[in-house]
Amino acid sequence: MKKFHILTIFPEFFEGFANTGIVSKAVKKGLVYLNTVNLRDYTTDKHRTVDDVVYGGGPGMLLKPEPIFRAYEEISKEKKPYVLITEPWGRRFDQKFAQELSEKDEIMIICGRYEGVDERVKAIVDQEVSIGDFVLSGGEPAALVIMDAVIRLIPGVVGDEDSLRVDSFSDGLVGYPNYTRPPVFNGMEVPQILRSGNHKLIELWRRWKQIENTYKKRPDLLKKADLSEKDKKILHYIKKGKKFEDFISDNKV
Ligand code: SAH
């Protein structure tokens, strides 16, 4: 079972998340344990203070270090977790990072608020993590994004594991387009190949679309993608502006 310990001043933020869809199922199956830790429970003063003013002046408040250390120490008594802190300048979260995290048994995520967190907290942090170059009002939405991406990689969580294999980014490319019924909607038709029942051809078409979409929408990904000789040939055709049909007839598929 994978455990997440989320240190936050807003534990209620995670209620909808824990009770919805795949995550809720994973929790019920005992594959995931979400431990939302209210930092106020680790304060010692009567006002349960979690924040304080910034040394040296400047606007806003900071999360105090003591409640965070106390919560960490209690969690670590059982097992030392891998510790993340949400920071706008942290390591950019992506599918590779999610895969790495899916291999850790226990992950603790410290959610910053206000102007952030007292720097001394970094003494217990293994990795700072960011979900993008923008500023959120707190680390909670980032923690939620991270947990969602990691949880669906845990074996047994997503019903059909093939769907993980074909996900975007799993092989460095974006996904291929999908259609469901009806076959014609508002004059727009589902591509004939997908209704042909020719599985080899469908597989080739999907690969073509993945490479085409990556080339058109995320060319930056192509540099690092794991392309076979056949993929490279497809890319060559796409770059020359040729059609899937040309590829098929030229290569006698
Ligand atoms: N003063 C900070 C911004 C604080 S925002 C600065 O100069 O950058 C408050 C908290 O929200 C942060 O401590 C962090 O925990 C979280 N946060 C904001 N943007 C984030 C992002 N892009 N990714 C992850 N966490 C973020």
Image: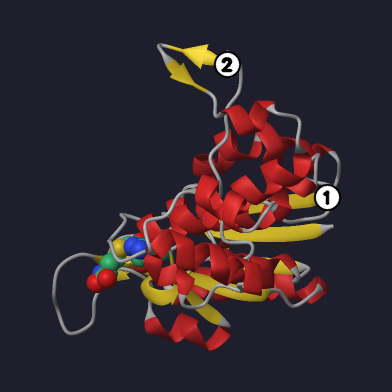
Count of picture labels: 2
Determine if residue 187 is in view: yes
Q: Please, what is the three-letter code of the amino acid marked with disc 2?
A: Pro
Q: Please, what is the three-letter code of the amino acid marked with disc 1?
A: Leu
Give the class, few, some or many, for how many residues have Cα within 10 Å of label 1's Cα (few <14, many ≥20): some
Q: On the image, which quarter does residue 48 sit in?
A: bottom left
Colour scheme used in the picture?
secondary structure
Percent position of residue 23, x then y:
69, 41
Q: CA distance from mark 1 to mark 2?
A: 38 Å
**Label 1 with label 2: CB-CB less than 8 Å:** no
Q: Is residue 167 left or right of residue 92?
A: right
Specify the label residue 31 is tagged with: 1
- Residue at image position (61%, 53%) is 207
Percent position of residue 227, x then y:
60, 72
* Element carrying mark 1: loop
Picture quadrant of ligand 1: bottom left
Percent position of residue 215, x then y:
41, 61
Of 8 and 213, the residue lying toward us: 213
Q: On the image, which quarter does residue 37 sit in?
A: bottom right
Q: Is residue 31 left or right of residue 15?
A: right
Of 65 and 212, the residue lying toward us: 212
**Residue beneath label 2, please?**
183
Measured along the vertical axis of the image, is residue 221 above or below residue 137?
below
Give the class, few, some or many, for how many residues have Cα within 10 Å of label 2's Cα (few <14, many ≥20): few
Q: Is residue 110 left or right of residue 188?
A: right
- Residue at image position (57%, 16%) is 183
Percent position of residue 104, x then y:
74, 71
